[in-house]
Amino acid sequence: MKELLNYAKASPEAVAAFRGVETYVRQCGLDHTLLELIKTRASQINGCAFCIDMHTKDARARGETEQRLYALAAWAETPFFSERERAALAWTEAVTRIAQAPVPERLYEELRRHFSEKEVVDLTMAVVAINGWNRLAATFRTPPGNYQPRK
């Protein structure tokens, strides 16, 4: 697939503004392994090849197992994820698919069993951010494969 536009070069100011949200998410205190799982799952749902490539590489660099990454698309049917991770993944899917149906209150209640109010907002901001990045990268067909995790 051919890249339509390098959005970061075309509008560096817009990307810098959006990076502000990403910077907050990275520094908000949520576990980075969890963040990579939700970024990968949202990217799977959105069909963003660039972001799937990036976040699976970042997850592996942080020590995530191949087994869990392979099973992520079917996380609800596997025993590989903690209750906290399962609540976050369910929330990620519901927020990512918000146009199809409202987020069920029961998901919020389950999420609150594992996360503080601040963490719920921060987790939601992480989902909002990755959905935005997915829409940029998928829309403009950012090619996957060249990303390398930071050392």
Image (tube, grey):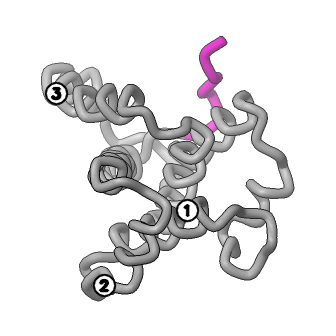
**Along the polypeptide, which appears first: circle 2 or circle 3?**
3
Q: CA distance from mark 1 to mark 2?
A: 24 Å
Q: Which mark is residue 44?
A: 1
Residue 123, percent across and down?
37, 51
Position of residue 134 measured from the top left corner of the image (x, y, whole percent): 39, 51
Name the element at disc 1. Answer: helix
Q: Main secondary structure of the magenta part?
A: loop
Indicate the secondary structure of the residue bearing disc 2: helix
Q: CA distance from mark 1 to mark 3?
A: 25 Å
Q: Amino acid at mark 2?
A: Glu
Crowd band around label 2 with a 10 angstrom C-alpha radius: few (<14), some (14–19), many (20+): few
Q: Is residue 61 above or below residue 38?
A: above
Instruction: Provide the residue designation for mark 2.
Output: 105
Name the residue rendered at 67%, 78% in the picture: 76
SS at badge 3: helix
Where's residue 3, x and y in %?
42, 40
The answer, for residue 40, to whether it is visible in the render is yes
Pointer 2 with pointer 3, Cβ within 8 A: no
The residue lying at 75 percent from left, 36 percent from top is 60
Residue 140 visible in image: no
Magenta span? 144-151
Q: Which residue is mark 3?
A: 17
Type of amino acid at the residue the image marks with label 1: Gln
